[in-house]
Image: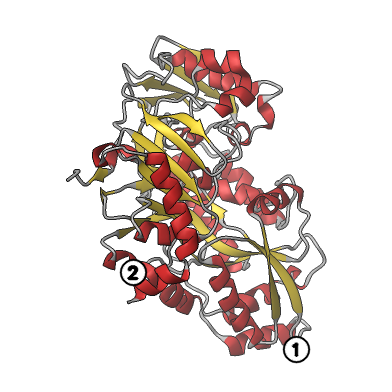
Amino acid sequence: MRIKRLARAHVLPAILLGLAVMTARGSEALAQAPLTVAVEVLPRSGNPFSSTSIVDLGYWSAFYDAPTLVTTDGELLPWLAESWRPLSLTSWEFTLRDGVTFSNGERLDAAAAEAAFSYLKSERGKIEPVARDLANIARVRTVSARVFEVHTTTPDPLLPRRLSSLRLVAPQAWARLGPEAYAQTPIGTGPYTVEVVRADRVRLKAFAGSWRKAPAPSLEYVISTDPIARQSALQMGDVDVALNAVSPDEFEAVQEAGGSVFIDRIPAVVALIFNTVKDTPFRDERVRKAVVMAVDRAQIVSTLLGGHTAVADQPATRGMFGFDPQIKPIAYDPARAKALLAEAGYPRGFSFDMEMPASKILYTSVFQAIAADLRKVGIVMTVRQLPQIPFQEKTQTGNWSGPAFAWPFFSPTADPLYAMQYHSCGWVAPWYCDPKTSEMLNMALAEPDLTQRNSQTAAIMRRAHDTAQALFLYESVSFVALGPRVKSFRADYGFIRFEAIQLAPSK
């Protein structure tokens, strides 16, 4: 009955979406039907150096690959590079897979890797987000057809993990087309190539020469900003995969329709970020701790996330390098929260605005629950939603309207210090500045020994917890709704493993 009610409530957007998909399929036989993925938004660019956001990986994973891949368990896998080894404290040797080609026929070789780094070191390339993340790389040298060396300015024992964010491009096409034109027709080593781009969808065709096997002869991304419309289209059989379309209380509806849900653990801790650069109550550590104690995070995880993840008490998830399992949680204690507020000079509480990105399937309900808990101790939090792009721009400009906002501690390399660099004094537009943490961070980033680096990272995690740097909420997860056609599915940190997808045979 629940499925029928959902379908009736959203029948118009679902039918419109379904008709569009069926029209695109035309008279194809079932065996030739595209694998169809419903997404909220596609990347603003097909330039793989233009973003480090996990949001873009669901699309880019169809055609781009990096030298390494970090899994949801924090394991580092060989990807385009089959092996690597340190040559010294500041140099590494990487060996690429043999026989891999780009979709335009260019060969993947060491020169392609060197060309990518050369672009990132150019005046134009230096402004790319990926260039910022790889700024410690001084130069790359081709040794042989498949071997290249990476030389860093300072020791970087986690460099192989860091290269998981470097998606390689076909060097000759990149040099000929330039970033803008290349972004329109991306060329990679993945299982698909872009065929047709429209306002509401992108159609890709399988690249037979890819080292990763395509599960279907064509792939279609359908853009739908409404998560309920994405779910309805899935239930009607017009979509095979719906990203960020369901919450745990809707799992049953998907399963009753013959589908399933894949839970992808994201390398991020969802948090309410305190702005201590501005003159706000959150400059006082007692106020920050009061906010943490006032929010029943265990209840949020249990009710809104179905218990599918864990409460976070540090800016790292389990399995991350430097995660400290000895950190003791800050307990839910509204009475103690009120006492701390009184000590800090706010016996009657205070009011503030917080900003969050719109269209997040769970964010709205999570932060409404936080607002309800805070109101019980006298703090009035008003939630203001912004479109994704303007919100991301504020992380670069610091032009926040209020003293708090929702943004994760995101570490795509499973190294929490990646995120801490954003949430520190050294960020281009800082919102939290603790000189002691910055000093510890700089020391850890320069530490060449992995054991010492791990210990120093854990110490930074403890300080973030002890000073209540943010309201750490939970370890982020992504719920991917799958239709009946999809018999197996795998994603790692948002990177869809198309080669692992199995579709039901045609009838």
Q: Residue at x 67, y 28 (%)?
A: 126
Render colour scheme: secondary structure
Q: Which element type, helix, strand or loop, lies under badge 2? A: helix
Indicate the amino acid at tag 1: Pro
Q: Which element type, helix, strand or loop, lies under badge 1? A: loop
Residue lying at the far front of the rendered structure:
27
Q: Position of residue 158 (x, y in %)?
A: 47, 37
The image quadrant of residue 270 is: bottom right
Residue lying at the far left of the rendered structure:
507
Q: How many numbered marks appear?
A: 2
Q: Comparing marks 1 and 2, which lies closer to the viewer?
A: 2
| Residue placed under numbered mark 1 in the picture | 347
Q: Is residue 25 above or below residue 324?
A: above
Q: CA separation, marks 1 and 2?
A: 46 Å
Q: Is residue 484 above or below residue 147?
A: below
Whether residue 413 is visible to the viewer of this picture, yes or no, is no
Q: Position of residue 250 (x, y in %)?
A: 38, 70
The image quadrant of residue 232 is: bottom left
Whether residue 210 is visible to the viewer of this picture, yes or no, is yes
Q: Is residue 95 above or below residue 390?
A: above
Q: Residue at x 48, y 50 (%)?
A: 39
Q: Position of residue 259 (x, y in %)?
A: 29, 59
Q: Residue at x 31, y 40 (%)?
A: 33
Q: Which mark, residue 253? A: 2
Tell whether 77 sits left or right of 331: left
Q: Position of residue 12 (x, y in %)?
A: 49, 62
For marks 1 and 2, the one nearer the N-term is 2
